[in-house]
Image (cartoon, helix red, strand yellow):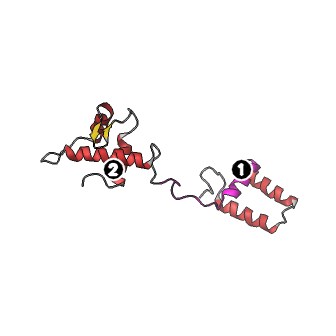
């Protein structure tokens, strides 16, 4: 198992090197020779060995720091547009449960706008994508069951 995705040096070799280096003093010239020998053994530079040692036990984030936050628009604005799409889909539902698609709802909002109590709301073309709106409709539980 490599230490990192890009490291050609196996993790057990890096651990053994780390243990050998820990036994030496920080100023010992033997440290450089140990690193150089590992670099020659695996055909990489000494910088790659030091980088692999540094990244050996670095914790990795399990998810993005901005998880759940839209990157296209501010959350309040995107939530408002998603509510309008959900309302349009609900309003166009027939007795068989069929309704206008998300793509068509976005096209209607871009081309004609939607009349709301706050006035006409029109979305600029290309601002909303179908996959983004569908994702947040289900994420915020605005879609129909």
Q: Position of residue 67 (x, y in %)?
A: 48, 54
Q: Taking 110 as reference, is 3 left or right?
A: right
Measure the C-alpha gap from mark 1 to mark 2: 45 Å
The part of the image, by quadrant, that contains residue 10 is: bottom right
Task: Please tell me which residue lies in front, 90 or 118.
Answer: 118
Residue plotted at (31% across, 43% down)? 118
Q: Position of residue 55 (x, y in %)?
A: 66, 57
Q: Taking 133 as reference, is 69 left or right?
A: right
The part of the image, by quadrant, that contains residue 126 is: top left
Q: Secondary structure at mark 2?
A: helix
Is residue 124 positioned above or below 6 on the image? Answer: above
Q: Position of residue 39 (x, y in %)?
A: 75, 51
Q: Nearer the viewer, mark 1 or mark 2?
A: 2
Is residue 105 positioned above or below 59 on the image? Answer: above
Q: Residue furthest front?
A: 118
The part of the image, by quadrant, that contains residue 11 is: bottom right
Residue 137 numbered tag: 2
Decide: few, some or many residues near mark 2? Use Cα within 10 Å; few <14, some 14-19, many ≥20.
Answer: many
Give the residue pinned by disc 1.
48
Residue plotted at (63% across, 57% down)? 3
Q: Position of residue 46 (x, y in %)?
A: 76, 50
Task: Please tell me which residue lies in front, 86 or 25.
Answer: 86
| Residue 132 magenta-highlighted | no
Query: Where does the magenta region start and end?
Result: 42-67
Decide: few, some or many residues near mark 1? Use Cα within 10 Å; few <14, some 14-19, many ≥20.
Answer: some
Q: Quadrant of the C terminus?
A: bottom left
Q: Secondary structure at mark 1?
A: helix
Tell me which label, 1 or 2, sits earlier in the chain: 1
């Amino acid at each position: 198992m490599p230490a990192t995705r890009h490291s050609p040096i196996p993790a057990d070799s890096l651990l053994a090197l780390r243990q050998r280096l820990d036994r030496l003093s920080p100023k010992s010239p033997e440290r450089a020779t140990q690193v150089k020998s590992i670099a020659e053994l695996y055909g990489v530079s000494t910088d790659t060995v030091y980088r692999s040692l540094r990244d050996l036990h670095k914790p990795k984030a399990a998810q993005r720091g901005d998880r759940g936050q839209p990157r296209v628009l501010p959350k309040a604005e995107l939530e408002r547009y998603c509510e309008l799409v959900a309302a349009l889909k609900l309003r166009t539902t027939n007795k068989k449960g069929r309704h206008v698609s998300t793509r068509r709802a976005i096209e209607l909002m871009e081309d004609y706008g939607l009349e709301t109590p706050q006035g006409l709301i029109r979305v600029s073309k290309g601002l909303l994508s179908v996959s983004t709106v569908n994702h947040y409709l289900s994420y915020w539980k605005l879609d129909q069951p």
